[in-house]
Amino acid sequence: MRTLLQAGNMNAIAEEAKKYKIDAVTLQEIHWKGKGTIRKSKFTMYYSGNEDRQGNRGVGFIVSKKASGILAYL
């Protein structure tokens, strides 16, 4: 996967993680502006990028629904 700026790529990564039973995936250079959380039915994505502009730097985590529940207790 080259970029998360293309529609559907985040879901594709989450599906691959599910296929291999991986509960957390670390992403780098996601190139999104700002920071936030995206909640889907099967996973949650936490991300943080450059505050000034899109297309520069950024990291993120895709976490399974199971792992999200565990994180809520920490």
Image (cartoon, grey):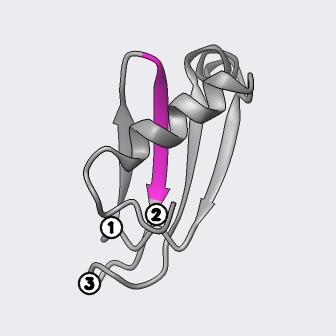
Q: What is the CA distance from the residue labelled 3 to the residue labelled 2?
A: 12 Å
Q: Which residues are magenta?
A: 42-47
Q: Earlier in the sequence, mark 2 or mark 1?
A: 1
In which quadrant is the C terminus drawn?
top right
Q: Which residue is mark 3?
A: 53
Q: Which residue is mark 1?
A: 34
Q: Which residue is mark 2?
A: 48
**Of residues 35 and 43, which is closer to you in this image?**
43
- Residue at 70% from the left image edge and 18% from the top image edge: 70
Give the image location of residue 35, x and y in percent.
38, 60
Give the image location of residue 59, x and y in percent.
55, 65
Crowd band around label 2 with a 10 angstrom C-alpha radius: few (<14), some (14–19), many (20+): many
Crowd band around label 1 with a 10 angstrom C-alpha radius: few (<14), some (14–19), many (20+): some
Left/right placement of residue 17 relative to residue 43 reads right
- Residue at 60% from the left image edge and 34% from the top image edge: 16
Displayed quadrant of residue 8: top left
At label 3, the amino acid type is Arg
Contact, mark 2 vs mark 1 (Cβ under 8 Å): yes
Left/right placement of residue 64 relative to residue 5 reads right
